[in-house]
Amino acid sequence: MTEKQATFLSELQSISSLRQISSLLGWDQQVNLPPGNSPSKQRASQRAVLATLIHREFTSVEFQDKLRELEQMEIDSNEDWGVILREVRRKLDRAIKIPSEFVARKAAHQSRAYHAWRKARQNDDFASYAPILEVTLQLAREEAAFAGYADNPYDYHLDLHDPGMETLSVAKLFDALQVELVPLSQRILGLAGTCKLPALKNFPVTQQEVFLREVVESLGFDFSRGRMDVAIHPFCSGNGNDTRLTTRYDADNPLDSLFSSIHEAGHGLYEQGLPAKWIGTPLGEAAGMAVHESQSRIWENQVGRSRQFWNLWEPRFRELFPEALSDISSEDLFKTINLVTPNPIRVDADEVTYNLHVILRFELEQALFSGELEVSELPDAWSEKAERLLNLQPKNDAEGVLQDVHWSSGSFGYFPSYCIGNLLAAQLWETAKEDIPELESLIEAGENERFLAWLDEKIHRHGSRMNLLELTEHATGKPLGHDPLLRYLEERYLVLYEQN
Ligand code: ZN
């Protein structure tokens, strides 16, 4: 490494350290902040100071000059340094193009919008929130225009979450998926509807903690380089040697804590698998939201809801919760774990219908950005799409268009990542089973090392060297498609429920 590269690297890593500190403060806010301190102005101002500092350092003339000097050297774009320069340039261009006046205006509106959304959801009053959402949407368009996407603003927002993705490519995937998934989900719902399943109640929280830790550890999450705490909304933050998971407990909903923990552990395994020597650079960062989501979903669903996984874990589950499970048969337990049921709420949806919830939002976002749809028309458009995709009607707007926080914070183009993550998870799973024919027996034996090493080889170690579509081709030898997800859902759910 030349001296210039070393200086640049050290600056890049100090900016990244500032970002990590900010994220640590965010973690602390969710996990530790005393309740009297909430909502915390003190914490908000600490993070605002850091955000200003990060922006200043990252966009400083000195930093830009150093980057330009390195860019003039001849470096192969596929080599480590080529990737670092390419990715830093991409982010820097964006940061420079968006004026700080706009960033401040957007932040001020966001906090207003969040409160307005919460109130509107509480009162089931979309009309009071619509004018605010209009401003949010206008700001999102303005931001895209600053970044050079005046003619295709939604592409900008998709690309922010998953570099390389565009409206057209996502639409193509989702259109093909829904043609088959709508009838398949109705067929599965029809079969599942005839099952009578028991409610899971009275699972002592202390025992749940024991079980979760054992499960998460067995997946390969390294507790000597990570931790797990309690937060209202489970999330994973940190990276490398300091990866932090959170979970929540409910004595009458043990599967929620279990599967959200496995999900977050999947994110955590990705973060722990990023190459240590490049932490603080793009080579030590995840390749985007959808790739991240593929890692959480593959452990949560393909592994965690499988027959093999439960053959392994059911005895221990019963040992820890003998009373709660005494009247519940193995088959009923397994069906409860894989319950498919109509639900208007996305976050409570099963993995079969979940993707249709995402497609609904994608279509609405796309129509809002193209100008086909007005904000005031959202509730009706929502109902129409819910009917067509999910065969249900929300009782009210709180259960429909007001259910998610995302739009209130100006997060457009975020929802698609959830479904794309599911597509990728299924495609990776199919390839992994070809590469490791005994994969399912290994899972049944609790030997997850080889699968984790496979994910590491295919995904984790590459950081953001490749984008989602490149990484998919690299890992599976095929372009990202919708068939593996359909095959996986058919195999798991038709087989399970057709036995009735
Ligand atoms: Zn996730």
Image: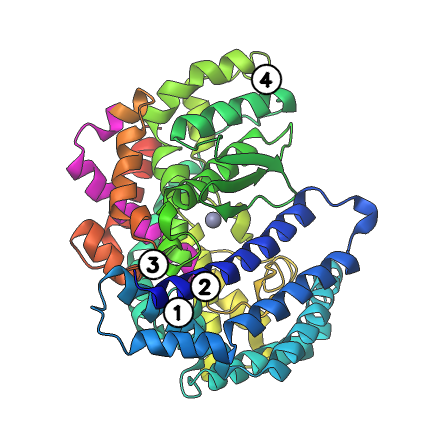
How far is the residue under mark 3 from the one under mark 2?
Answer: 15 Å
* Residue at figure coordinates x 79%, y 45% from the top left: 35
Categorize mark 3 by other alpha carbons within 10 Å: few (<14), some (14-19), many (20+).
Answer: many
Please identify, in this view, whether the residue under mark 3 or under mark 4 is nearer the observer.
3
How far is the residue under mark 2 from the one under mark 4?
Answer: 52 Å
How far is the residue under mark 3 from the one under mark 4?
Answer: 45 Å
- The amino acid pointed to by label 2 is Leu
Tell me which numbered mark, 1 or 3, is placed earlier along the sequence: 1
| Total marks placed | 4
Q: Which residue is identified by label 2?
A: 12
- The amino acid pointed to by label 1 is Val
Is 410 situated above or below 470?
below
| Quarter of the image where the N terminus is located | bottom left
Please identify, in this view, whether the residue under mark 1 or under mark 3 is nearer the observer.
1
Residue 362 rendering spot, x and y as whole percentages:
44, 67
Residue at the right extreme, as displayed: 36
Check if mark 3's residue and mark 2's residue have beta carbons within 8 Å.
no
Check if mark 3's residue and mark 4's residue have beta carbons within 8 Å.
no
Q: Which residue is identified by label 3?
A: 464
Q: Which mark is residue 324?
A: 4
